[in-house]
């Protein structure tokens, strides 16, 4: 026996059928909402003046996270080995080893 499954996406605002997922970002937070064509047009109209006067930002710039100063992982691995600490040749260095390195330097 065969079964057929149908997924109906409803508008998150008014519950109407035939909605599509719309993604947007505001204040650094990404959102998704399912909207019918009617509500999608309302959203487009509401955002239009802000989009018209806003600046486009590339994804790489938006999604970059702030990180601390770069560390010389090769030097840390060398130091850890000289101290008899186990550290892999590649990949992540444990927080414990990093803390011991920072305390020693």
Image (cartoon, rainbow, N blue to C red):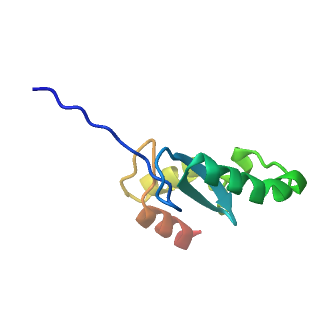
Quadrant of residue 30 in the image? bottom right
Residue 24 appears left or right of 92: right
Residue 53 location (% of width, % of height): 90, 55
Farthest residue to the top: give it.
Answer: 1
Given residues 55 and 78, the one toward you in this image is: 55
Quadrant of residue 31 in the image? bottom right
Farthest residue to the bottom: give it.
Answer: 103
Quadrant location, the C terminus: bottom right
Residue 55 appears left or right of 46: right
Farthest residue to the right: give it.
Answer: 53
Query: What residue is rendered at 15% in x and 26% in y?
Result: 2
Query: What residue is rendered at 40% in x and 51% in y?
Result: 87
Residue 67 location (% of width, % of height): 65, 60
Question: Would you say residue 87 is visible in this rendering?
Answer: yes
Given residues 42 and 31, the one toward you in this image is: 42
Residue 19 location (% of width, % of height): 51, 47
Rendered position, 51 above or below 20: below
Residue 78 location (% of width, % of height): 50, 50
User: How many tags in the picture?
Assistant: 0
Query: What residue is rendered at 59% in x and 49% in y?
Result: 22
Given residues 1 and 72, the one toward you in this image is: 1
Query: What residue is rendered at 49% in x and 69% in y?
Result: 99
């Amino acid at each position: 026996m065969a079964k057929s499954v149908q997924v109906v996406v409803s508008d998150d605002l008014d519950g109407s059928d035939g909605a599509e997922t719309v993604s947007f970002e505001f204040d650094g937070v990404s959102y998704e909402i399912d909207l019918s064509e009617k509500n999608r047009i309302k959203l487009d109209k509401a955002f239009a003046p802000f989009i018209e006067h806003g600046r486009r930002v590339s994804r790489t710039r938006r999604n970059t996270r702030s990180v601390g100063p770069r560390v010389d992982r090769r030097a840390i691995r060398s130091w850890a080995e000289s101290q008899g600490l186990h550290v892999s040749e590649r990949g992540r260095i444990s927080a414990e080893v990093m803390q011991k390195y920072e305390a020693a330097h």
